[in-house]
Image: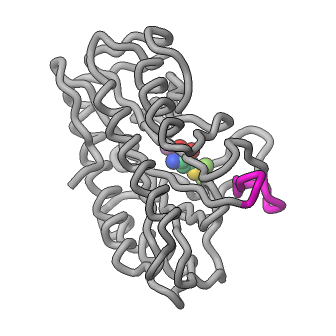
Amino acid sequence: MILLKSRKEIELIRESCIIVAETLQLVKKYVKPGVTTGELDKIAEDYIRSNDAVPAFKGYKPAGMEPYPASICSSIDDQVVHGIPGHRVLREGEIISIDVGVIRKKYYGDAALTVAVGNIDDEKRRLMEITEKSLYIGIEQAVKGNRIGDISAAVQEYVESNGFSVVRDLCGHGVGKHLHEDPQVPNYGSRKTGALIKDGLTIAIEPMVNAGTYRVNVAEDGWTIVTADGKASAHYEHTIAVIDGRTEILTRI
Ligand code: MF3
Ligand code: CO
């Protein structure tokens, strides 16, 4: 069931989303060779808590899984999403997706971006650019009267026409009252299918784009999603809302 939000609720979601966006910009500044992902996690958690908010991922427990142990997801190179921060040291040439979720006053925000560690090769740079652009192409379709499948198809067409692939096993999602709500927002699909986009819809659109195959596996830690062929992956995410027929990106500052 899709939970459409009132204006008041969207303003609360926006407050959480602003903290998410600020956290991402803060963490991005610390991404350099030699830094550990655990250090990035601490910077994020401290910032979120100092804003009277709580990291939404910490302790998040889907059925049959261990609770997620950290405040951010940090996913490097062939890690697609849900990489657990820890002792791993960032090295020049890597790309790292940082994903942040926040809950404040019972409302959630969720966003992610990918950052280069020092100089990166041309393929990774292109992968990052195409993935970020695909997010905005998806957002353009997230307008009143369209359907979720219009977002999905636009992302998929753009990514595949640029020679990359979209992950199928994970999706964007409704967000706001919960971290994950209906509807699912796949990054592949057909136009004119899926739920109708209406005022009050709040969703996280999050293309996960692989340089090689779209196929992924779960790593030994039970959380980290990795590409099946070991090639790099990038990930960008915004929480957006449809208000009075207009689409607003809530996690952009
Ligand atoms: N943005 C990610 C998602 O929507 C965050 C989930 S990480 C988790 O799937 F650790 F909380 F699962
Ligand atoms: Co998300």
The secondary structure making up most of the magenta span is: loop
Residue at point 36%, 45% (across, down): 133
Instruction: Left or right? Give the position of 22 relative to 236.
Output: left
Relative to 97, 200 lies left or right: left
- The residue located at (28%, 30%) in the rendering is 140
Total marks shown come to: 0
Q: 15 or 233: which is nearer to us? A: 233
Where residue 70 sits, quadrant-wise, is: bottom right
From what the image shows, is residue 66 above or below residue 243?
Answer: below
Which quadrant of the rendered structure holds the C terminus? Answer: bottom left
Q: Is residue 227 magenta?
A: yes
233, above or below 86, in the image:
above
**Percent position of residue 164, x then y:** 56, 45
Instruction: Please tell me which residue is depicted at 59% across the width and 56% down the height of the picture.
Output: 233
Residue drawn at (42%, 77%) of the image: 43
Point out the residue furthest to the right here: 220
Task: Indicate whether 178 appears above or below 65.
Answer: above
Is residue 65 toward the left or the right of residue 207 in the image?
A: right
Q: Position of residue 110 (x, y in %)?
A: 42, 47
Which stretch is magenta? 218-230
- Measuring from the top left, give residue 202's x and y in whole percent: 35, 29
Magenta stretch: includes residue 92: no
Q: Nearer the viewer, residue 179 or 191?
A: 191
Percent position of residue 119, x then y: 45, 80
238 in relation to 113, above or below: above
Q: Quadrant of residue 51?
A: bottom left
